[in-house]
Image (tube, rainbow, N blue to C red):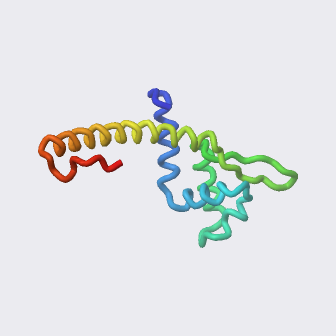
Amino acid sequence: MDSHSDEPLLDQAFLALADPVRRQIIARLSRGPATVNELAEPFEISKQAVSKHIQVLEHARLVTRSRDAQRRPVHLNPARLEALTAWIGQYRLVREEQFRSLDAVLHAQAAAKGGPQAKDPS
């Protein structure tokens, strides 16, 4: 997900997740599919408002809907969440490497000075 063509999808997903109601919907769907009525239960907003939140999540491809007789359950799209996690993860790995390099420099400086940090903590 590092190409510029993916940026609109990233923007949509992060904007969708910026809302606490939508994050709670995602959290609920992580436990399994649910109908709009089931998703609306914990909120003090209308079912229509919950439906609009679901539409935003659908537009961001974070959730999908299926048809099961009269029911239209909403499902989490785990592949989409994994793509977001991978995008975030690439920056986390860069930072971790920078911290490891900084630790090595500080350890070398402490060893050169003979200070208390000279001992290897591992």
- The foreground one among 108 and 7 is 108
Residue at position x 21%, y 47% in the image: 118
Q: Quadrant of residue 99?
A: top left
Q: Position of residue 36 (x, y in %)?
A: 71, 60
Q: Is residue 37 left or right of residue 59?
A: right
* Tally of numbered tags: 0
Residue at the spot 18% in from the left edge and 43% down from the top edge = 111
Q: Residue furthest left?
A: 113
At 41% across and 38% down in the image, what residue appears?
93
- Expressed as whole percent of the image width and height from the top left, the position of residue 3 reads 46, 27
Q: Quadrant of residue 105?
A: top left
**Quick check: 11 left or right of 31?**
left
Question: Residue 4, position in %: x, y?
Answer: 44, 28
Q: Depth check: 85 or 5 in front?
A: 85
Please indicate whether residue 104 sits to the left or right of residue 93 in the image: left
Residue 25 in the image: state x and y as whole percent. Answer: 61, 58
Above-or-below relation of 87 to 27: above
- The single residue placed furthest to the right in the displayed view is 69
- Name the quadrant containing residue 61: top right
**What residue sits 14% from the left and 46% below the top?**
114
